[in-house]
Every structure is written in C-alpha cells, then in structure tokens.
Amino acid sequence: MNKFQILIVDDTEVNIEFLKTLLGTWENECEYETFEAKDGNEAILLLQGKPGIDLVILDMMMPVYDGFYFLEQYEKEFEKKYIPVIVMSAAGDTRSISKAFDYGIYDYFTKPLSSGQLMSFELKVKNALRMKNTMDQLRERNRIIENEMNLAAKLQRKFLPNEISNENFELKYYYRPYRELSGDYLDVIPLAGDKVLILIADVVGHGTASAMIGSMLKMHAIDFVESHPDFDLVDFVKNSNAELIRLGVEDTIVTACFFIYETKTGFLNYVVAGHPYPLVFDFDQDDVFSLENPGTLPLGLFDNIDVMPGEIRLKAGQTLAVYTDGILEAKDSDGEFFGLENIESTSKDFVEANDVFEYNRFITSLIGKLDSIQDDVTIVFFSIRK
C-alpha cells in the first residue's frame, strides 16, 4: 500500500479536522499521514524538518504568515522538490487564486466544500499525488542517468592521450566538453620510423551518441595502425570515412584534421577534412598563418571522397594550433560569435607579445574573451623544440 504524507496548513482547527476526516473516508489503496501547520511560517519549518511531504493543502487567509508568505518561501527553498500545492480560498476570491497560480500551484478549491465538490476535491488530491509520485520516479531515473553520464565522462577523459614533452616536440591540449560527454576526439599514436600520428576530430553534435562515435573512431585508428605497418595517411582517411559509412548512423558527420609528423626531417603531412584550418605560430617572424591546401570533405557524407593531403616543414620554435569549431561558435561579451577573425587576431597579438609559446598564458587570453560556450571545445598545441 502506498503511503503519502500530506501537510494541511490552516489556522482553523475545525477545517483541519474536517479535511483529515475526509481523507480517511476515501476508498483506495493508499494510506494518508497528515501533518498540521497553523500558518505559513510554521509550514515552512515543518517542510524543512520533514523532506518526505508529498502534498500541501494550503489556506490562503491566515494571520501574519498567510498563504502567499508560504508560496514565496516555498518558491525559494523547495521548488525543485516538486511538492504540489492545492490552495483553499474563499468563494469568489479569484484575484488570490490567479496570483497563487503565478507561484506554480497545482490546483485550488473554494471553501467551504459543498457536497457537490467532494468528488472533485478527491480527484484533485489523488491526481496531485499521482503527479508527485511520477515526478519522484523521474527524478530518481534522472539521478541514475546523471551518475552514469558522470561515470562515462570520467572514462572518456581517461581515454585522452597523455601530453608529450621530449627533445623534439611538445604536445599539450585544452579539452572542455559542453556537457558531461564530448563529441570531440583527439589521439596521438606512435608510428614506425620516428613518426607520430596526431588526430583531432569533431563529431557533429554533442552528448552520448557523438561520444560513442568518437570512441569508435579511436578504436578504428588504433586497429588500422596496428594492421598497416606501412601506414599511409590518405588510405587511413579513406578507410575512416568508409568505417563511418559502414556504421550506418544517420546524419553522422565528422570534421577532422590528421597529421603525420616526422621527427627526423620536421615535415608535417596533413589532411584537413571539413575542419577549421590549423594555425601556425611563428615567433621568429612575429606572425600567425594558417595551413592551406584544397581541403577534403567531412567524413561520413559520401561513400567515396577525394583526399587532398598537404605538407609543411615546421621549424624550431613554431607551434601548430588545431581547434574544433566550439571556439568559432562561442559568443563574446557582446553576444556575437567569436569567429575565425577573433581567433586569428588573438593568436597574432599573443605572438607579437611573446618570444615563445606559453600554454597557460594563451589559454587564459583566449578563453577569457568568451562569454558563452555552447559546444565542445578542444585545442591541440604542437610545439617544435629549438
């Protein structure tokens, strides 16, 4: 048998006893436990001490701490607990009833209750309790989902690559999911011949589905590298696109940048697939420029794509910055999209003001200009050692 706790707030004892007696006459599979309060302040104190209250039946006309006092305090302290409130008001007092609905009450009835109102009152109480029970179940399910999402987010972070600092280069990154799970994916995979594969991808959207696709891309990259000793970047990009098509997930689009860096020669081979073009910070020349090549379509759109690779030789002291479009779509303090122009100007100002790349200083400068971020944000920095 379900057991519900009902708080009756009224300064008249006979009204309280009448409602308690009425609740006891209903034939159902529920049991009602009632609590009493003489005014709005006493009711608030009782709610603070008894978190299990399921319904409040509230008289609006009480001395000093009336029903509106209760509703004001309830809105501040208990709104997220989803406790329905049914108010009692004098017949014809439509103004108070209308004002009470502004506070989000569940329903109302006028007193004194006539014999014709008894069935209606019973339905209102039972429906309010059903709603409370449903909301409690939803809150519990949401709590479980939230816990699972938090766990998944922790696991996703564990799959991120370690930052690297060796005699040849330094790799650092900024990673900020919009919600718990991110649709951004990055990885660093060693290759034979003193080469390293660097991947950064942005699955359109964010959340669980995007995160799962990102994880699949990660596993595919690892499997492809292990099964292809003579790794070829163009073949890898084509194969990754084919894998997304094979998954058959509707509207799956991935923008990505793929890099192979040769530590012996300093050459960087790359493919930009529908992604924002990476920037190169050149501190010797006080300059910032973007990588350029004809470009490749995003992955997941067509069965066959033409992959257009590019090549550049990075010099000691240069830093390659690769970012997802969460930065472009972020808004500044004026509510305007940050956009490519602001990213480039922020980067150029930084290069002109500094002799070397300093991760923390640049991130502070860039993120400090963003007022609202509405997407996953990932920025990878690849610095060549002097």
Image: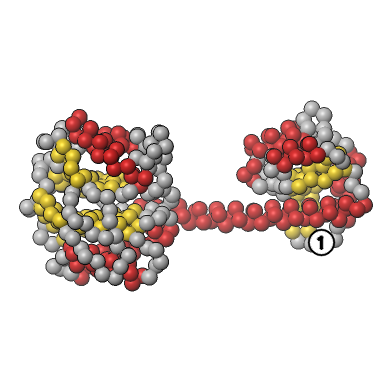
User: Does residue 22 appear to the left or right of 35 in the view shown?
Assistant: right
Q: In this image, 54 relative to 191: left or right?
A: right
The relative height of residue 364 versus residue 29 in the rendered view (above or below) is above
Quadrant the C terminus occupies: top left
Asked which quadrant contains residue 242, the reply is bottom left
Can I make out residue 48 in this image? no
- Count numbered badges in the picture: 1
Q: Residues within 10 Å of mark 1 (few under 14, many from 20)?
A: few
Helix, strand or loop for disc 1:
loop
Q: What colour scheme does the image use?
A: secondary structure
The residue under the point 78% across, 36% down is 96
Q: In percent of the image, x 41 and y 40: which residue is there? A: 372
Taking the spot 17% from the left edge, 54% from the top edge, the residue there is 293
Name the foreground residue: 91 vs 263: 91
Residue 98 lies left or right of residue 221; in this view the side is right
Look at the picture and state if 329 lies above or below 366. Answer: below
Residue 162: percent from the left, percent from the top?
26, 51
Compared with 307, 72 (above or below) is above
Q: Residue furthest top?
A: 64
Position in image of residue 257 (x %, y %): 24, 55
Residue positioned most to the right: 115
Answer whether residue 128 is visible to the viewer in this image. yes
Q: Position of residue 67 (x, y in %)?
A: 77, 35
Q: Amino acid at mark 1?
A: Asn
Q: Residue at x 42, y 60 (%)?
A: 209
What percent of the width, then of the height, locates residue 341? 28, 39
Viewport quadrant of the N terminus? bottom right
Q: Tell me which corner region of the image, top left, top right, bottom left or bottom right, holds residue 12.
A: top right
Camera-side residue of 50 and 129: 129
In the picture of the structure, the residue carrying the numbered disc 1 is: 28
Q: In the image, is residue 353 above or below residue 184?
A: above
Relative depth, front residue between 302 and 5: 302
